[in-house]
Image (cartoon, grey):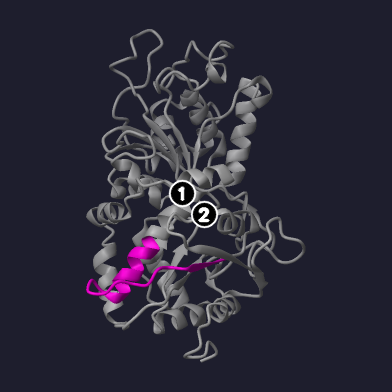
């Protein structure tokens, strides 16, 4: 992880303004919304510190606002103290999620303050991180309810998006136990842009080729999604229904696996557990990834045989997500002041979270290219409820309001008093 963050310290391709513009063109007017909202604040200056908040387990528990969430965010807004919402959640468009959150917390929020786990995927529309532009390429999007994630991807600017539902309706034999879900998939499936591979015919120009795989949100049908992702990672150049002849070749890197033009695999959220309505934490997208890696290991022999699943991880605790969030935070600080003034150098960011494995670890390990220091504040209102945390925070407090008070005191904030 430290090596990954050292890499992202020199990571310059994160074009956050272009990403926001892309989101705006496709139904997410982040900049205009933010400007309208910020004009109501009209501060004369901004601080050299800021906050980043997780959502589930910090501001919400399931769909209900936690007791002092409104007080915490309202205080920061009233005093022009910058903050962003940095969540490993997703599955909905940013505009929809912000509207829901604003209503539940009873605080006016804006998409310019908001980073979901899959928000940085919008950058890949135009290319980045060594990946060619995917705007018009065929991508497989998995996870979420129905085809909501497909619609999110399309609003990001991807124009050729398929889902597991599209594939299983086109050929139910791909996963022989899918009949129980047939009506669900039929409700949102679309025709595939090209036919599936015919074993008796030629595949290289006439059949479906997938150029990237995105796990946007927690998969609802682990079995089908596992089968399709596995098929594509074992395929010849992403043609679904084929097998690469390089698989298992001991003379090639990774024993030939993922060495034959297979599509890259992107996960948006590494959280194994999350705080839902049930009194114990529930498995998240990280649970699906662990299960998939177990299947991959069983098929390929895994790392014991020299085979590693090649994938790109987004979301907390990964440095790529913190770098994206920090640049978005800098844009927000500038918007608070307006174009005529320059904000002071950002010295400190307080990451408030409930999950030691993602929120706390990410803040502890992130090394900012801008030179700001990220400190971690662990709250007891979500995944973590007591005991020795897996990753030690800077401080542990009861809830989000206590976290804000601690951060303000730590930064020497004196007027008005945080109890006001």
Q: Quadrant of the N terminus?
A: top right
Q: Is residue 151 above or below residue 375?
A: above
- Please name whichever residue, 362 or 313, is drawn nearer the observer in this view of the structure: 362
Q: Position of residue 13 (x, y in %)?
A: 35, 45
For the residue labelled by badge 1, is the local secondary structure a helix, a strand or a loop? helix
The stretch of residues the image draws in magenta is 328-352
Q: Is residue 49 magenta?
A: no
Q: Is residue 77 above or below residue 240?
A: below
Locate residue 297: give its quadrant.
Answer: top right
Q: Position of residue 29 (x, y in %)?
A: 26, 62
Residue that lies at the very extreme toward the top in this rendered image = 200
Q: Position of residue 132 (x, y in %)?
A: 32, 33
Q: Are marks 1 and 2 in contact (CB under 8 Å)?
A: yes
Query: What residue is rendered at 48% in x and 46% in y?
Result: 314
Residue 138 appears in the figure:
yes
In the image: residue 125, left or right of residue 390:
left
Kindly report the distance in space between the C-alpha atoms of the residues bearing marks 1 and 2: 7 Å
Say whether disc 1 or disc 2 marks the residue closer to the N-terminus: 1
The residue that mark 2 highlights is 367
Q: Position of residue 249 (x, y in %)?
A: 56, 11
Q: Is residue 334 magenta?
A: yes
For the residue labelled by badge 2, is the local secondary structure a helix, a strand or a loop? loop
Q: Is residue 193 above or below residue 300?
A: below
Which dot marks residue 9? 1
| Crowd class of label 2 (few under 14; some 14 to 19; many from 20; radius 10 Å) | many
Residue 219 appears in the figure:
no
Which dot marks residue 417? none
């Amino acid at each position: 992880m430290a090596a990954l963050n050292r890499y992202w310290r020199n990571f310059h391709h994160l074009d956050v303004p272009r990403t926001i513009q892309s989101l705006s063109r496709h139904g997410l007017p982040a900049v205009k919304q933010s400007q309208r909202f910020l004009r109501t604040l009209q501060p004369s200056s901004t601080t050299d510190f800021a906050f980043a908040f997780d959502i589930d387990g910090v501001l919400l528990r399931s769909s209900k606002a936690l007791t002092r969430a409104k007080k915490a965010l309202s205080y920061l807004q009233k005093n022009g103290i910058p903050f962003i919402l940095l969540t490993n959640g997703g599955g909905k468009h940013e505009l929809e999620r912000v509207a829901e959150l604003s209503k539940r917390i009873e605080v006016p929020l804006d998409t310019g303050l908001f980073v979901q786990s899959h928000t940085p995927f919008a950058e890949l529309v135009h290319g980045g991180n060594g990946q060619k532009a995917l705007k018009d390429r065929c991508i497989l999007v998995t996870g979420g309810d129905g085809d909501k994630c497909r619609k999110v991807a399309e609003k990001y600017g991807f124009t050729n998006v398929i889902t597991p539902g599209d594939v299983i309706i086109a050929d139910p034999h791909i996963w022989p136990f899918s009949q129980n879900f047939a009506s669900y998939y039929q409700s949102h499936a679309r025709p595939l842009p090209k036919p599936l591979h015919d074993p008796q015919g030629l595949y290289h120009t006439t059949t479906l080729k997938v150029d990237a795989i995105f796990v946007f949100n927690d998969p609802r049908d682990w079995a089908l999604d596992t089968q399709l992702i596995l098929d594509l990672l074992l395929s010849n150049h992403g043609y679904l229904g084929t097998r690469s002849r390089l698989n298992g070749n001991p003379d090639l890197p990774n024993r030939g696996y993922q060495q034959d033009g297979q599509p890259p695999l992107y996960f948006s959220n590494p959280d194994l557990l999350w705080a839902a309505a049930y009194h114990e934490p529930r498995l998240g997208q990280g649970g699906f990834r662990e299960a998939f890696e177990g299947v991959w290991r069983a098929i390929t022999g895994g790392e014991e045989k020299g085979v590693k699943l090649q994938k790109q991880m987004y979301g907390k605790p990964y440095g790529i997500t913190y770098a994206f969030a920090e640049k978005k935070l800098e844009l927000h600080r500038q918007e608070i002041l307006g174009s005529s003034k320059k904000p002071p150098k950002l010295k400190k960011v307080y990451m408030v979270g409930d999950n030691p494995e993602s929120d706390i670890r990410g803040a502890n390990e992130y090394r900012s290219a801008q030179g700001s220091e990220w400190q971690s504040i662990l709250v007891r209102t979500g995944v973590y409820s007591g005991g020795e945390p897996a990753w030690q925070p800077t401080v542990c407090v009861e809830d989000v309001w206590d976290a804000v008070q601690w951060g303000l005191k730590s930064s020497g904030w004196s007027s008005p008093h945080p109890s006001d």
